[in-house]
Image (spheres, grey):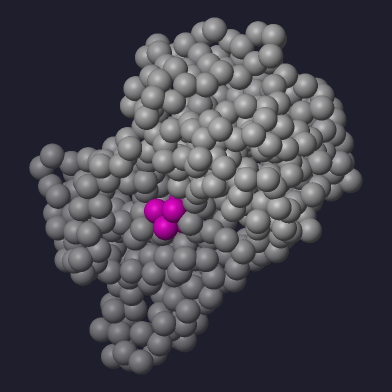
């Protein structure tokens, strides 16, 4: 892609005690790109995402957001996190706040926006995810799919430069997955810069500009969906995709 | 005769309530700070506050009361029995309140902190706007229990000569030779106080409850 690079990671390594979660991972995300990371569970995909927005510190390597090194010591990490949106597998909505307040609180308390302006912005984002009519509901009154959409609105409200999705539909009942994926597809269509970790291959194939296959803490292969799915280069990629498409009932050429 | 009798003990009620109303908030303040330090401070904060809790809860309140009283009304700090007793009860209660709040903070969950930080809040903001408001709601039922306990434990300061309900009951029992009447009246008043306090807090729990929220 020719657009400027929004996020760049260089040689990231993360170690927990004896385990190497990932080693020397480098990647770059261009503006407007949708990157989907696939791979077996436990291969460090989620940890990688949490390192990208500095929730988890890396042990070595650098991360640059729009050219600025955010892994530098002098950086105000909280301020950086305002610019990177994150959506979690178990939604993590603030339980004591309504949907509207969940979306607003970052605006009023972190960005110090005046209340009317924040309310307007919050309702705009809730409409964007199709939940304006549920603004006054509490998370416990919403379905999983609705909660996740509110979580997306909450992240969007901060006007992030890039959105990170950590297995956003893995905790959802099957019939609720679609509504979340279509919000995400819409965002991608609107040229939001996104990095998505998911097992939803259909979404990956349809929406991704580039797919990264990660296994055992390293990037095995990456490329545009058609290339990766039709002509996977690496044997492990072939094996993984074969197993996945077998699961979904579609036989692809090996 | 009976009414003068009764009114003498009832006058002690104000003192009992005062003692409780000093001990409880004092204990809450220390308990909250220590609970936050335990959960969110460093390794040493956790160890030290944990030790405090263990020690204070491992000794009978009356023993601690005497120790703290002699310290608080000694040479370095000189407080009246009323104040020394009230603050001592507050210190004892702080350990139990710390445990209640610690549990409530933990029940809110680390995920809430993660989500708060993900939208750019710093830890203080996350605690103030996200964690503590939820923790308080969870803490109300066990805290209601602690209120009952402190109300009843306030009777321990009779040993320091503070003229609260039990002390007066004791004096009355001695002068009138009617122990059942004297201590029975005291019991009734304590019961009424505890009952009212619990009812009030139950009402508060109802009012602040979130719709269908089951943590």
Residue found 41% across the figure and 75% down from its top: B9
Per the rendered image, the range of residues in magenta is: B101-106
In the displayed image of the protein, which residue is found farthest to the left? B75
Q: Position of residue B188 (x, y in %)?
A: 47, 82
Quarter of the image where one finds residue B130: top right
In the image, residue A90 above or below residue A219 = below
Q: Nearer the viewer, residue A64 or A243?
A: A243
Residue at the (52%, 21%) spot, across then down: A27
In the rendered view, does A63 fall on the left or right side of A19? Answer: right
The answer to whether one can see residue B125 in this image is no
Q: Is residue A127 visible?
A: yes
Pick the residue in front: A32 or B43: A32
In the image, farthest residue toward the right: A133
Q: Position of residue B74 (x, y in %)?
A: 12, 47
Position of residue A172 relative to residue A26, above or below, is: below
Extreme front residue here? A254
Q: Quadrant of the image for the N terminus of chain A?
A: top right
Q: Position of residue A234 (x, y in %)?
A: 52, 35
Quarter holding residue B100 = bottom left
Dominant SS of magenta comes to helix
The quadrant of the rendering that contains the C terminus of chain A is top right
């Amino acid at each position: 892609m020719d657009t400027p690079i929004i996020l760049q990671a260089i040689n990231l390594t993360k170690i927990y005690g004896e385990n190497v979660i990932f080693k020397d991972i480098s990647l770059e995300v261009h503006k407007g790109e949708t990157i989907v990371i696939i791979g077996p569970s436990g291969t460090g995909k989620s940890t990688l995402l949490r390192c990208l927005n500095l929730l988890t510190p890396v042990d070595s390597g650098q991360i640059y957001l729009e050219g600025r090194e955010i892994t530098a010591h002098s950086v105000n990490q909280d301020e950086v996190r305002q610019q990177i949106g994150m959506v979690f597998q178990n939604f993590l909505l603030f339980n004591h706040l309504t949907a509207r307040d969940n979306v607003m609180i970052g605006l009023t308390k972190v960005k110090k926006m005046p209340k009317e302006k924040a309310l307007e912005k919050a309702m705009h984002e809730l409409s964007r995810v199709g939940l304006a009519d549920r603004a006054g509901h509490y998370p416990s009154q919403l379905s999983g799919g609705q909660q996740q959409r509110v979580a997306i609105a909450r992240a969007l409200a901060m006007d992030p430069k890039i959105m990170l999705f950590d297995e956003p539909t893995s905790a959802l009942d099957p019939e609720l997955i679609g509504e979340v994926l279509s919000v995400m597809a819409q965002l991608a269509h609107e040229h939001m810069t996104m990095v998505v970790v998911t097992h939803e291959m259909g979404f990956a194939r349809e929406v991704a500009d580039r797919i990264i296959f990660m296994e055992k803490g390293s990037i095995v292969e990456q490329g545009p969906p058609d290339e990766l799915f039709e002509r996977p280069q690496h044997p492990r990629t072939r094996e993984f995709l074969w197993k996945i498409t077998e699961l979904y009932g579609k036989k692809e050429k090996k | 005769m009976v009414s003068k009798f009764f009114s003498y003990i009832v006058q002690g009620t104000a003192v009992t309530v005062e003692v409780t109303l000093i001990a409880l908030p004092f204990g809450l303040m220390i308990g909250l700070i220590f609970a936050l330090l335990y959960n969110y401070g460093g390794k040493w904060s956790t160890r030290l506050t944990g030790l405090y809790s263990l020690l204070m809860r491992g000794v009978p309140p009356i023993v601690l009361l005497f120790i703290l009283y002699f310290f608080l009304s000694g040479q370095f700090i000189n407080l009246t029995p009323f104040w020394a007793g009230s603050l001592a009860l507050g210190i004892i209660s702080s350990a139990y309140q710390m445990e209640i709040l610690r549990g409530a903070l933990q029940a809110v969950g680390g995920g809430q902190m993660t989500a708060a930080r993900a939208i750019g809040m710093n830890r203080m903001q996350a605690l103030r706007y996200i964690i503590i408001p939820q923790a308080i709601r969870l803490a109300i039922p066990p805290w209601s229990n602690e209120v009952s306990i402190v109300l009843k434990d306030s009777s321990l300061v009779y040993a320091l000569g503070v003229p609260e309900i039990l002390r007066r009951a004791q004096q009355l029992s001695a002068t009138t030779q009617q122990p059942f009447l004297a201590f029975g009246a005291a019991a009734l008043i304590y019961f009424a106080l505890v009952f009212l306090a619990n009812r009030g807090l139950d009402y508060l729990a109802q009012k602040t409850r979130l719709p269908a929220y089951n943590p």
